[in-house]
Amino acid sequence: MNSPVTLKALERAMHNDELVLFYQPKVCLLSGEVIGAEALVRWAHGDASVLSPDEFLPMVESNGLLHDLTLQLLDQLVGAIVELRDSAPIRRNAPTGLLPPELSLSINVAPNDLASRSISNHIASLLQAGTIKAAELQIEITESAVMSNVDLVYDDLVRIKDLGVKVLMDDFGTGYSSIDRLSQLPFDALKLDQGMVKRMGTSLQNLDVVRSAISMARELGMTSVAEGIESESVYNFLIAHGCEEGQGYFLGRPMSLADFRAFVTTEHDFEGSQIGRVHQACLNLLRFRKTLVDAAFCSRVGEGVALQSVADPGLQSDVVSTRLGLWYFGIGQRLVSHPVFNEIEEPLRKVHGSGLKFLEELERHRSVAMLDQQLADIDQQVNRLISLLHSLERSILACKQNR
Ligand code: C2E
Ligand code: MG
Ligand code: MG
């Protein structure tokens, strides 16, 4: 039987390093590769039982010990990063030159950890000393903790992000943040709450909630991460809708560092697919066209809306930096074995160039009537690209069926 959790036992445990991190694998849903883990604290209790955070974190927090614990765990995490770096994970399906970045481990923090700046100072010195690289570390903080402490945490979140360390909003969907508020916060990723993910299978409405959360992340230029994936059907649905990363018992439970090291060096058969991402590429394209129409419409009716304000935030002068380009010239390149993929580049560059030219002409106050032919040409290019992307979707489907 477990001995009761007392403050004295807890302090002793912290002193004796009995609070240890377990690691739950995170998988890239586009490639099926293990890309890192979330570090979750456990108390390796004296009688060989392992206590979960719910059983002792409230006591840590109410006794003002959480900040010390976070610093202690951060050092443990850094040790794990260094150890895993040398364990050469197996990278499946990765053509030369397209190797994914190093494994990245995330740690959970509370608002007070950020308010004191000591965590960000510590991270800054680790990076400066070259002990870890920014891409190897991520920070998770829950939506509700952020939303009720925005003033307390904002500066440090920005500082951590500026250091190049990714900041993830945890348990997204439980804290009532508006899209407006979200867009003002410096998050790199939204972690969809596991309750939301689990309810997905219970009604069409719940399914739509997850779909919308993935779309919202995409619209805000953030990565979508799903937690609590417990079944293959949920896993496949998330892939189909373009969710980028996932975590859950279906992929792997939290485990000791030694087990996680063995996990990353073992080949897994997690299916990855870009089918949902290709659909998002179609949506990016339609959004691009809509930007042009909006620009023309708003300038024509003279509502005083500057062209920039209606322009797609993903609209960049260089096609490679657009949302669509980031996919096509990035992880999309893993689809080169599908012949139709290679047909996309030329029309993609063309439609982007034509779109920018259209906006330039508008700025020179050319009338929309004069530009009608130009827009019609762009529409033809958009239609051609969408048809190529649909062929690519079918080609990916055909490969899945042959698996
Ligand atoms: P979290 O950060 O949202 O972590 C995910 C929790 O869901 C973990 O519980 C994990 O074991 C559990 N989980 C993951 N996949 C599945 C699944 O497929 N099904 C089910 N039923 N559960 C799954 P855990 O480890 O008990 O942690 C609970 C919470 O405690 C964490 O939620 C986090 O908010 C907090 N926590 C954990 N470690 C730390 C820490 O080191 N520092 C701080 N400040 N908080 C921590
Ligand atoms: Mg977390
Ligand atoms: Mg969570």
Image (cartoon, rainbow, N blue to C red):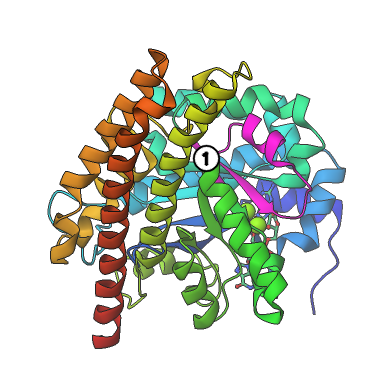
Q: Residues within 10 Å of mark 1 (few under 14, many from 20)?
A: some
Instruction: Tell me if residue 180 can be seen.
Output: yes
Q: Is residue 203 above or below residue 119?
A: below
Q: Considering the image in quadrants, where does the N terminus appear?
A: bottom right
Q: Which residue does the image show at 56% across and 72% down from the upper left?
A: 229
Answer with the quarter of the image where residue 122 lies. Answer: top right
Q: Is residue 159 above or below residue 256?
A: above
Q: Which residue is most to the top?
A: 364
Q: Which residue is most to the front?
A: 369
Question: Label 1 belongs to which residue?
Answer: 188
Instruction: Tell me if residue 121 can be seen.
Output: no
Q: Which residue is most to the bottom?
A: 402
User: What's the magenta region?
Assistant: 165-189
**Front position in the image: 157 or 105:** 157
**Front position in the image: 24 or 397:** 397
Q: Considering the image in quadrants, where does the C terminus appear?
A: bottom left
Where residue 321 appears, as percent x and y from the top left, is 32, 34
Magenta stretch: includes residue 223 = no
**Front position in the image: 124 or 348:** 348
Where residue 390 appears, as percent x and y from the top left, is 31, 66
Q: Which residue does the image show at 38% across and 53% down from the upper left?
A: 281
Q: Is mark 1 within 8 Å of ligand 2?
A: no
